[in-house]
Image (cartoon, rainbow, N blue to C red):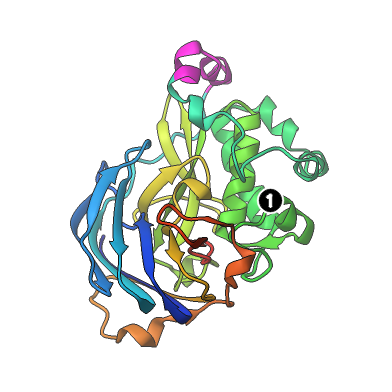
Amino acid sequence: MLLEIRHVTQYLYDSPVRESVMEVWMQPQKGAGQRLISFELELDPPAQLFSYADTFGNAVYHFDVPQPHDRLTMVARSAVDTQAPAPLPEALDVGEWDRLRSDFVRGENFDFLRPHGFAVETDALKAFVKEKNLEELRVRDPLSALLELNDILSKSFGYEAGVTDADSPIDHALEARRGVCQDFSHIMIAICRSWGVPARYVSGYLFTDRKAGDRSDPDATHAWVEVFLPSTRWFGLDPTNNVVAGERHVAAAVGRDYADVPPSRGVYKGEAESQLAVGVSVRRARAAMTEPEFLRVSQPSASPRNNRRRGPFGGITYDQQQQQQQ
């Protein structure tokens, strides 16, 4: 499936800021089942782009806008050719649990087995696991258990933006029984790791198909989970839409949780308050809309609410992290 993706992010400041430094995780990955045809990142104000590969092999772009500005706009355009993954087996033997406990598997996937950041076992999560009798799934083989977990999580939570924030712990979604892709993914990752199944957070995009039952927002980035089994290697599960990740999913970055791979993250120098506008388009054909037509303004993010500290270039600096959830 040939997909074109346009991802617009705009930070607006109520007074000019003196400098911005940003990192961006928006380039689709190159790998099996996903061929990156092109990627470009347009900046306004213009800035020189640099890139590096992070700990998990993701492409990260970073730049510095050293002059005063009252807005910062990033437009990422990608073309990706995706292939449907090989179908999963109907089931595995229960000996797969023993293979998961091998020193090799645990050593190779150390980062994706430990609780981290948002993906941690909390009292609320333990209560949810008990309520849904999720531990009973472990009498089945790991693949069957994971597919059933994906189904249970999808049916247990309503999809609703605005119930949680980008920095909300999983307890907020567990209490409300509502949330967005980011929340469902963190909950699933925490459960998988408690079972001894390596699990990682995937940040990316989805070509939404309402006829297939997709309920995630087509105008936003998407998030899902990849799990590792020795007999299947890594494969994706999307608890938001209750599907196995396929050719409609485009992975941009993987990490332990959202904090490892936000679409953008940075700091600015100044006392201004910021507001964020985001628009995402994933289409088979090139979009004809102008940028403002699909920019969606989020709730204002007041700078004092963020992490205030002394910046690396002096003065007061505020963490400026994209507040669009996945």
Q: Residues within 10 Å of mark 1 (few under 14, many from 20)?
A: many
Q: For mark 1, give the secondary structure.
A: helix
**Residue 315 x, y percent position in the rendering:** 48, 61
Residue drawn at point x = 38 percent, y = 78 percent: 71
Q: How many numbered dots are placed on residues in this image? A: 1
Please name whichever residue, 189 or 46, is drawn nearer the observer in this view of the structure: 46
Instruction: Decide if residue 237 is in sight here.
Output: no
Quadrant containing the N terminus is bottom left
In the picture as drawn, the residue positioned furthest to the left comes out as 37
List the single residue furthest toward the front. 314
Which region shows up in magenta?
93-107
Q: Quadrant of residue 67?
A: bottom left
- Rendered view: 23 above or below 9: above
Where's residue 234, x and y in %? 41, 35
Near-viewer residue (238 or 275)? 275
The residue shown at (38%, 48%) is 253
Whether the magenta-drawn stretch holds residue 167 is answered as no
Q: Which residue is mark 1?
A: 170
**Compared to 158, does 137 lie above or below?**
above
Judge left or right: residue 124 versus residue 156: right
